Image (spheres, grey):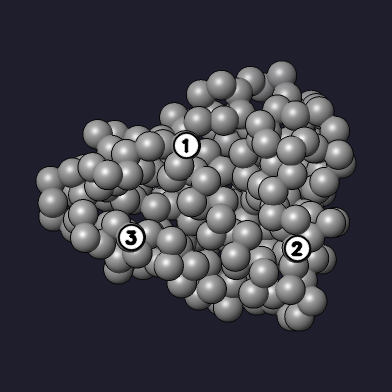
Amino acid sequence: MNFEVLNIGLTDYEKARALQLELVEKRLRGEIPNTLVLTQHPKVFTIGRTGSRSNILVPEAKLKAENIQVINVERGGDITYHGPGQLVAYPIFLLPKGHRDLKSFLRLLEQSVIETATNFGAKTCSIEGLTGVWESPTGETYLPSWHGERKLTSMGLAFKRWVSYHGLALNVETDLTPFSYMNLCGLVGKRPVNLKDLAAREVSMEVVSEVLVNEIKKLVAPWEEEI
């Protein structure tokens, strides 16, 4: 299945959020095709529906001094961080009738990141009971439990009448310091990692973006006959 790609570059989080909501309404009215929005954000913590500010570990004054916003949003999940050097992808996709399983769609996005990382020689995996994509010291693409693996990609979705929005945040070459200011995804002891630190070859935001788009296209190809 083909979809439009809209790369808006470094964009304020609230502006990107407003764009998503606008695109969701257009997709519901059939005015646009499925659209993947690619972006990066200035430094911001976002807190999902099940999240809490109690997972922020530093005083508000420190966040203000470092120009880190804190925004509550409607996606699933807890708290995460966005910043320059992190690839954020928002799929504005109408799930076809044969694929209206929210967890399966989340797994599809996880798999697209795992395949993207593989293109760069990085070993990553999904972990039972956790969302997102993690490093895989063993090279297995699925682990039954967490044993200290670092997190490469956070994910959180929202849906309106089967149209998805929000999405995934893949650490490519971002400053990881702000992750230490919170319990990542509300999970104590979890640490982040950049793709550049796991990869066997050079990475760039442009190339990673291209690879991710292609991997998502491969995985949603079976939708074609149901659109």
Residue that mark 1 sits on: 103
Is 75 placed left or right of 133 in the picture? Answer: left
Q: Secondary structure at mark 2?
A: loop
Circle 1: residue type: Lys
Circle 3: residue type: Pro
Residue that mark 2 sits on: 123
- The answer to which of marks 1 and 2 sits earlier in the sequence is 1
Is the residue 216 above or below the residue 184 in the image? Answer: below
Who's the residue at 27% across and 44% down the image? 98
Circle 2: residue type: Lys
Quadrant containing the C terminus is: bottom left
Disc 1 residue crowd, few under 14, some 14–19, many 20+, Cα 10 Å: few
Disc 3 residue crowd, few under 14, some 14–19, many 20+, Cα 10 Å: few
> How far is disc 1 from disc 3 in space, using C-alphas?
17 Å
Who's the residue at 13% across and 51% down the image? 30
Who's the residue at 74% across and 38% down the image? 144
> Looking at the rendering, which quadrant does residue 60 occupy?
top right
Residue that mark 3 sits on: 222
Q: Are marks 1 and 3 in contact (CB under 8 Å)?
A: no
- Pinpoint residue 43: horizontal percent, then vertical percent: 64, 48
Residue placed most toward the observer, 61 or 57: 57
Count the labels in the image.
3
Disc 2 residue crowd, few under 14, some 14–19, many 20+, Cα 10 Å: many
- The answer to which of marks 1 and 3 sits earlier in the sequence is 1
> Looking at the rendering, which quadrant does residue 185 occupy?
top right
